[in-house]
């Protein structure tokens, strides 16, 4: 155990968890393998069902055969086929990809910061994206939507580099705790500047709508760019997962095993920025997916990020597809903001977890 | 023993000195705040008017408009500073502030409920706004305390932080749901309030805030020993003879009362509760008998300055004090972070 200064509570908490990890590092039993295979199959089936339900349910309920033929034998002249193909399919697939991306980003952050409460908000990603959007609304109100998305991604990238730079420049280097603190404060700063701009230029509600976001507006043209990038980066994250597992066991363990900590942290953070930054730019700030899903995955499958990352991807996709469906169905024809729906599902679960927390920080 | 006493004495002297200096700065900032605005009144005339002289117009501007607002700012600044210091001691977390307790989220929900149901902000119903925000804040805090209460250990600090995050997110989601349905003007008012623009500007608001500070602040100041003990950790505190469960609950109640009252009059100002205790700790060290009064005064200086800057520099749309506080406070905090090990 290293010295514990008053700030280093999160680290202290996970340090205590290390022996647990070491104990479970036994030969993988066959029962474990079967259990893992079952979990992955069940999640994949769940995702399939969720996607199917989300495509067929809505303002116009559609039958199984119509959905099937619309997807696989698209006929432009049929109205129902058009609804499915042009409106629901990109939206549902967008929700799935973005849900997976946010959940994977969350799990990487929790591994890197060794903080089971970490989420992408920690890096100031949402705050950076929002700030740039606010500035564009105020000074360049006529920018096309596509440009705005690119700009908001750049904002996310900048704020992350700022947080990372501030954390790394301090004496003692980039500790997980310092990353968390500088992220929280940077987010507060950018958030305040955003609301200052919004108030001065009377833009508050426009920004709130952008922020509440959602996947309703996602079109094929966006999805064709978004989906391949996100899927490739998710696949790349799975390659990173082994090193993240080692980092999550503590600096000393990772160093003893010959890991280049700085390099892995930087790569991990860049991966997170691409995943979360693109998602936020396309769908607004959807909180809680990145926090809750990795938690569930860890409870279900254990501490190895090689399994946590892919399971998070599947479950994140399920959650967002269902949340989007719920947001559409709650009070038609109006739509609820998807972030609200995610919070309604996520908060009770999170409070349940908090209630079970026995350790002291 | 004698050595530690000696250090205690110099510390006390230093704390008095710091308090005096801060009180001086507060007074200067107050006078400055009184003289700036759309109608400028020179500092000497401000003083003159305060002591009975001055023209009728100066009299009205000062006594009807600026003084009540500044009184609210002073009281809220002190309340937020003290509440933040208490929270950090209780949770043993230097990052805790009343926002952790979901107070702001609760107060915001109260406000959005109010504007959704009453719609008009100028009518007589507007007097009820502080009532709604206060109730929202207290309900959120009670909810979080219930969630983090354990039969054996009382309030568990880690649960306090976790359920704080959870409840705040849930309440914010409900707030977002309601606020997206508001018309544009009402929403603009709400956004301004949330960003921490000083809202109460009549004598009645200052009068409503005063009793909370007059009653709760002396209580908190009388409990500095418990705070010192609690910040050492549960076991140590119990060993010294503090009744951990009871003290923590009482002090938490005091922090909730102080910050809910302040937020209900001054709007959702977040950063002061975080930064005032930090500054105070750097100035006079970690002992609460020194830290607490200094944190109050720092809170006053920050909030009055921020409000004055916000309403005089940015015309015609005044920037809320909360934004000014964060824009100045956050870089300072980051600077500290980059220098400490």
Image: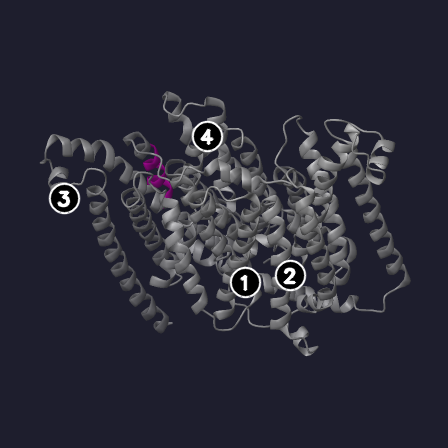
Asked whether residue B63 is in view, the answer is yes
- Residue positioned 68% across, 57% down in the render: A107
Q: Mark 2 and mark 3, same subunit?
A: no
Task: Report the side of A73 relative to B11 (left or right).
Answer: right
Viewer-nearest residue: A99 or A134 = A134
Count residues near mark 2 (Cα–Cα under 10 Å), then give few for <14, some for 14-19, many for 20+.
Answer: many
- Residue positioned 22% across, 49% down in the render: B27
Instruction: Indicate the quadrant where residue B338 lies.
Output: bottom left
Q: Which residue is mark 4?
A: B184
- The chain that hosts pointer 3 is B
Q: Which residue is mark 1?
A: A179
Q: Secondary structure at mark 3?
A: loop
Q: Quadrant of the N terminus of chain A?
A: bottom right
Asked whether residue A304 is in view, the answer is no
Q: Position of residue A61 (x, y in %)?
A: 78, 27
Q: Quadrant of the C terminus of chain A?
A: bottom right
> Marks 1 and 3, Cα distance to the nearest angstrom?
47 Å
Q: Between tags 2 and 3, which lies in front?
A: 2
Count residues near mark 4 (Cα–Cα under 10 Å), then give few for <14, some for 14-19, many for 20+.
Answer: some
Tell me which segment is drawn in magenta: B208-218
Check if residue A207 falls in the magenta segment: no
Q: Which residue is mark 3?
A: B42
Q: Position of residue B170 (x, y in %)?
A: 59, 39
Q: Between tags 1 and 2, which lies in front?
A: 2
- Residue positioned 47% across, 56% down in the render: A185
Check if residue B217 falls in the magenta segment: yes
- The chain that hosts pointer 4 is B
Q: Which residue is mark 2?
A: A271
> Marks 4 and 3, Cα distance to the nearest angstrom?
38 Å
> Marks 4 and 2, Cα distance to the nearest angstrom?
38 Å
Q: Are marks 1 and 3 in contact (CB under 8 Å)?
A: no
């Amino acid at each position: 155990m290293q010295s514990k200064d008053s700030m280093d509570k999160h680290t202290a908490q996970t340090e205590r968890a290390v022996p647990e990890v070491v104990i479970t590092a036994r030969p993988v039993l066959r029962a474990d393998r079967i259990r893992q295979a079952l979990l992955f199959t069940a999640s994949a089936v769940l995702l399939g069902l969720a996607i199917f339900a989300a495509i067929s349910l809505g303002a116009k309920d559609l039958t199984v055969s119509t959905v099937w033929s619309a997807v696989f034998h698209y006929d432009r002249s049929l109205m129902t086929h058009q609804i499915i193909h042009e409106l629901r399919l990109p939206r549902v697939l967008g929700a799935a990809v973005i849900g997976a991306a946010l959940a994977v980003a969350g799990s990487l952050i929790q591994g890197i910061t060794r903080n089971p409460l970490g989420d992408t908000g920690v890096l100031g990603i949402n705050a950076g994206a929002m700030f740039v959007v606010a500035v564009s609304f105020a000074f360049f109100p006529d920018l096309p939507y596509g440009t705005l998305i690119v700009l908001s991604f750049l904002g996310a990238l900048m704020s992350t580099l700022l947080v990372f730079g501030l954390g790394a420049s301090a004496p003692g280097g980039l500790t997980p705790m310092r990353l968390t603190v500088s992220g929280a404060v940077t987010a507060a700063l950018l958030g305040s500047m955003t609301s200052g701009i919004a108030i001065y230029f009377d833009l508050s509600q426009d920004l709130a709508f952008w922020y509440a976001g959602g996947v309703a507006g996602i079109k094929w043209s966006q999805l064709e760019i978004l989906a391949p990038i996100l899927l490739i980066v998710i696949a790349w994250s799975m390659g990173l997962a082994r090193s993240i597992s080692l980092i999550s066991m503590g600096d000393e363990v990772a160093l003893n095993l010959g890991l280049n900590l700085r390099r892995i942290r930087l790569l991990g953070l860049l991966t997170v920025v691409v995943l979360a930054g693109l998602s936020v730019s396309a769908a607004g700030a959807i909180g809680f997916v990145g926090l809750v899903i990795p938690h569930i995955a860890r409870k279900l499958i254990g501490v190895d990020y090689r399994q946590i990352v892919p399971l998070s991807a599947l479950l994140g996709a399920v959650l967002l597809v269902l949340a989007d469906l719920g947001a559409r169905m709650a009070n038609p024809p109006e739509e609820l903001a998807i972030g609200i729906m995610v919070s309604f599902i996520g908060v009770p679960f999170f409070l349940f977890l908090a209630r079970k927390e026995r350790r002291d920080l | 023993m004698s050595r530690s006493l000696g250090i205690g004495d110099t510390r006390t002297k230093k704390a008095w000195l710091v308090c005096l200096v801060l009180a001086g700065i507060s007074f200067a900032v107050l006078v400055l705040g009184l003289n700036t605005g759309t109608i400028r009144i020179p500092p000497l005339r401000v003083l003159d008017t305060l002591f009975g002289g001055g023209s009728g117009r100066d009299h009205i501007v000062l006594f009807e408009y600026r003084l009540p607002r500044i009184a609210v700012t002073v009281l809220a600044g002190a309340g937020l500073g003290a509440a933040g210091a208490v929270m950090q001691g209780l949770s043993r977390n230097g990052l805790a502030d009343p926002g952790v307790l979901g107070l702001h989220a609760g107060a915001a929900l109260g406000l959005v409920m109010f504007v959704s149901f009453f719609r008009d902000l100028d009518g007589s119903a507007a007097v009820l706004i502080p009532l709604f925000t206060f109730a929202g804040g207290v309900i959120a805090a009670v909810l979080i305390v219930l969630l983090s209460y354990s039969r054996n250990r009382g309030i568990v600090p880690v649960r306090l932080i976790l359920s704080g995050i959870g409840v705040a997110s849930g309440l914010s989601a409900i707030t977002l749901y309601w606020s997206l349905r508001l018309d544009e003007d009402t929403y603009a008012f709400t956004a301004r309030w949330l960003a921490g623009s000083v809202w109460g500007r009549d004598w009645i608001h200052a009068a409503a805030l005063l009793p909370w500070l007059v009653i709760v602040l002396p209580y908190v100041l009388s409990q500095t020993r418990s705070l010192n003990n609690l910040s050492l950790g549960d076991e140590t505190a119990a060993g010294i003879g503090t009744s951990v469960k009871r003290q923590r609950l009482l002090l938490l109640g005091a922090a909730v009362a102080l910050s809910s009252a302040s937020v209900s009059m001054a709007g959702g100002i977040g950063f002061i509760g975080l930064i005032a205790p930090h500054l105070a700790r750097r100035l006079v060290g970690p002992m609460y008998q020194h830290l607490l009064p200094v944190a109050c005064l720092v809170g006053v200086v920050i909030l009055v300055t921020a409000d004055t800057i916000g309403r005089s520099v940015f015309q015609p749309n005044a920037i809320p004090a909360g934004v000014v506080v964060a824009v100045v406070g956050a870089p300072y905090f980051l600077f500290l972070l980059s220098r400490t090990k």
